[in-house]
Amino acid sequence: MHGRNADSSSSTSPGVGEYIEIMEEAEPFISSPNSVNRNFQRRREEEETKEEHSGQNAVGDVYHDPPPIGITRAYATVVILFGINLLNYMDRYTVAANLIEIQKFFKLDENDVNGKSGLLQTVFIIGYMLTSPIFGYLGDRYSRKIILLCGIAIWSGTTLGGSFVPSDKYGLFLFLRAVVGVGEASYSTVASTIIADLFTGNRRTQMLMLFYFAIPVGSGLGYIAGSALTKLFGFWQAAFRVTPVLGGISCILVICFIKEPRRGQAESNNRNFWNTSYLDDLKALKNNRSWLYSSLGFVSVAWVIGALSLWAPVVIKYAYSIQGLDDSNVDFYFGAVTCVSGFLGVVTGTMGAQWYRRFNPQADPLVCAFGLIVGAPFLYLGLLLAPIVDIAAWGLILIAEILLFLNWALVPDILLSVVVPTRRSTASAIQMLMGHALGDALSPYIIGAISDCIRRNMDMSDEYEQFYSLQYSLYITTFITVLGGGAFLFNALYIEQDKLRIVKIVTGDAGNPADRVTNGALIVPVDGPVEDDQYDSYSD
């Protein structure tokens, strides 16, 4: 079934022209004994000859297969990566949970306090987005395990260092938050690609669902733990000294238990892949319409989540204050709402898309579009009712966040299904660059700056000015969600053909691929029995 030659494929394929087009696209990076790409097969043999003579790994684009990975270790890998991702987002949103305390500690200028506070998220994202393409390039070519370890060490160390910055060094605190972004970028760009190389089909979607639970749940725990630790110890710096310790433990777990899989292992049945040049990778991504439109949808999600994560707790606190209510538990409530909505949103989006794939191969982007478009009015009403009926506002925000979180596991699953294995880290990194450069690097600062401009023209008490200026500026998020929904609708127009193209490339089979696609996901049979300690790929 694998690796049919050109003549036999031509006789069975419904279109010879389509076969030629697919194999020409596959030529730069597929190498297999049965492949039509003989030039690259000869190159591989030359590299292996070099290795035999030198006694060392050949230097070049060829990637040498690591030993197969057992099923138990594969699941353990996902659990460890989930735990690290949880810490990643807990650390990120500890700042938002203690934003008012940080403002007071560094004595920020009252005239532009919101703008300067928004810079905390902006500089973090700038560090994150500027370095993610570098780590994407490295992640497609070098050891992802080492990249993981470096990333954890960097963000853990700089988070700890930020807790010791004196009150007159706000610029240094901003710098350290930018470096935290560098560390987290190195982890985030490669972690999901490891999961993609361990699983395929619906099982991959389920493992990505578990991995991306960490985003909303970790964010919610960041609010809860961040505010709780500040209350427990009496100073906000305590909240920044817990996750670094857990980060050190995570490094030990990565060293001891994670074994890196071969790129494309789960899909290709041990076919070998070559890396193309970075410029060729970027050109291919530019022409990949499913990846492009899903990335634009991700931009809108990042914009909205970036704005809400920093400013929603603040605006709700001011809403409580103008109603004469105690606002000391707002961070806890917001964190709990985020955890619950994240769990429900990720599960509903993933399981709903899996079910809908039985009837419509465009299911993934359509579910993403539905969540964003339908979530916009709930978000608007939640902000509108915040100073009037607090219980109703919390309920509306919960529904809005559930709908926003429908896409968390689906967006990376779309990426992994429409990009070849040797470009996935790069594709993930560029998608992050787009999402952060145009999304959450800008939105916290923009919302804060607009709020300051509105407040200058108000003549109310400080609490009323802060609330209404932030409320008006946050209304922008409802329009951005609708734009994101439109991007996913465009994505739905191309997703089926782009998935099919990758199936043909990865399997080397330009014949009828119907037996290789189940519920819109790639299923690759493994030759011979699969033993638990000789695991090649696992699929539903």
Image (cartoon, rainbow, N blue to C red):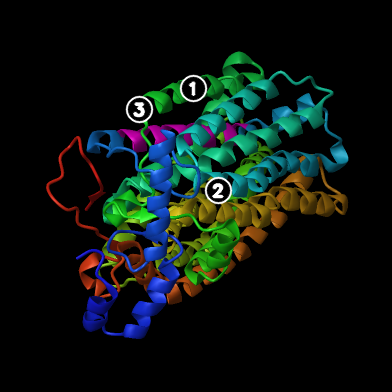
Q: With 397 as the anchor, is 159 left or right in this view?
A: right
User: Against 479, is 529 above or below?
Assistant: above
Q: Compare marks 3 and 1 and give the one earlier in the sequence.
A: 1
Residue identifier under label 1: 246
At horizontal 47% and vertical 71% (from top left) the residue drawn is 491
User: Against 391, is 377 above or below?
Assistant: below
Label 2 environment density (alpha carbons within 10 Å; few <14, some 14–19, many ≥20): many
Residue identifier under label 2: 136
Q: Horizontal and vertical percent for residue 14? A: 26, 84
Dominant SS type (magenta): helix
Label 2 residue SS:
helix
Please give the count of numbered marks on the rendered protein: 3
Residue identifier under label 3: 257
Q: Horizontal and vertical percent for residue 503? A: 33, 66
Q: With 23 as the anchor, is 331 left or right in this view?
A: right
250 drawn magenta: no
- Separation of residues labelled 3 and 2 (CA atoms): 23 Å
Q: Compare marks 2 and 1 and give the one earlier in the sequence.
A: 2
User: Against 438, is 262 above or below?
Assistant: above
- Separation of residues labelled 3 and 1 (CA atoms): 16 Å
At horizontal 52% and vertical 42% (from top left) the residue drawn is 188
Which residues fall within the magenta stretch? 76-94
Label 1 environment density (alpha carbons within 10 Å; few <14, some 14–19, many ≥20): some
